Image: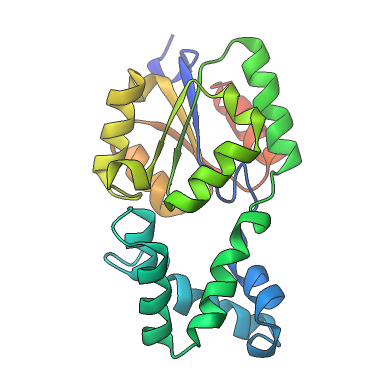
Amino acid sequence: MAQDKVPPQAVVFDFGGVLFNWQPARLIQSVLPHLARTDEQALGLAAEVFQSFVPGSDWSEFDRGALTWDETRDRIATRTGLPAQDVHGLMAAIPPHLAPMADTVAWLNELAESGMPLYFLSNMPRPYAEFLQREHAFLDRFISGVFSCDVSQIKPNADIFETAARQFGIAPERTVFIDDNVHNIKTARSLGWRAVQFQDAGQCQADLAELGWL
């Protein structure tokens, strides 16, 4: 049997956009509607505030655990010109925005019941990581996980994948990694992981079945 057809020994899930809702533009529209009257405005402001995957950006450093809440708020306010109160309100609205995605949670439970070892690898600032772990009992389905804030590393950099593989005691070539972001998928594949880009639970399950991985 070809190596890539050998059943996986573990599955590693991303959180935001896979297991939990994460739609920055929709968040902006709900919290700062006066600044995001159109979808285009919302997308532009979300990109400006969160600077996704910009090395050394305010939010990346918050993800990495290198900045406190107040430092992050103040840096974003200074950089964007938004009032600090508005930035604080936006940051405070994130925990309820990170609602569990029911279809993925149901699939996670099925995998757990089947005996599949489950882990997570997530970019997540400490306040939100602590909130999710406190509020959602289904996270006990995971044997272990890595939050960026706990290891001072962030996706899509290779080092956090290497840390995760070492901490979980898994072989990347026998592990399925699921993430919605193409940059993270590319890094995982370059390191030998079996990576599948997530759009929704049904699509991801179908892709994995087609590949013979689950």
In the rendered image, which quarter contains the N terminus? Answer: top left
Indicate whether 11 appears above or below 105.
above
The residue closer to the viewer here, 91 or 27, is 91
Q: Residue at x 48, y 82 (%)?
A: 84
In the rendered image, which quarter contains the C terminus? Answer: top right
Q: Is residue 137 left or right of residue 129?
A: right
User: Residue 145's quadrant in the figure?
Assistant: top left
Q: Position of residue 148 (x, y in %)?
A: 36, 46
Q: Position of residue 138 (x, y in %)?
A: 65, 29
Q: How is the image coloured?
A: rainbow
Q: Position of residue 167 (x, y in %)?
A: 31, 24
The residue closer to the viewer here, 153 or 67, is 67
The residue closer to the viewer here, 50 or 39, is 50
Res 104 seen here: yes
Q: Residue at x 59, y 73 (%)?
A: 89
Indicate whether 50 appears above or below 85.
above
Q: How many marks?
A: 0
Q: Is residue 194 left or right of residue 142?
A: left
Q: Position of residue 123 (x, y in %)?
A: 42, 49
Q: Is residue 192 left or right of residue 10?
A: left
Q: Residue at x 60, y 44 (%)?
A: 18
User: Residue 101's quadrant in the figure?
Assistant: top right
Indicate whether 82 appears above or below 23.
below
Res 181 seen here: no
Q: Residue at x 52, y 51 (%)?
A: 128
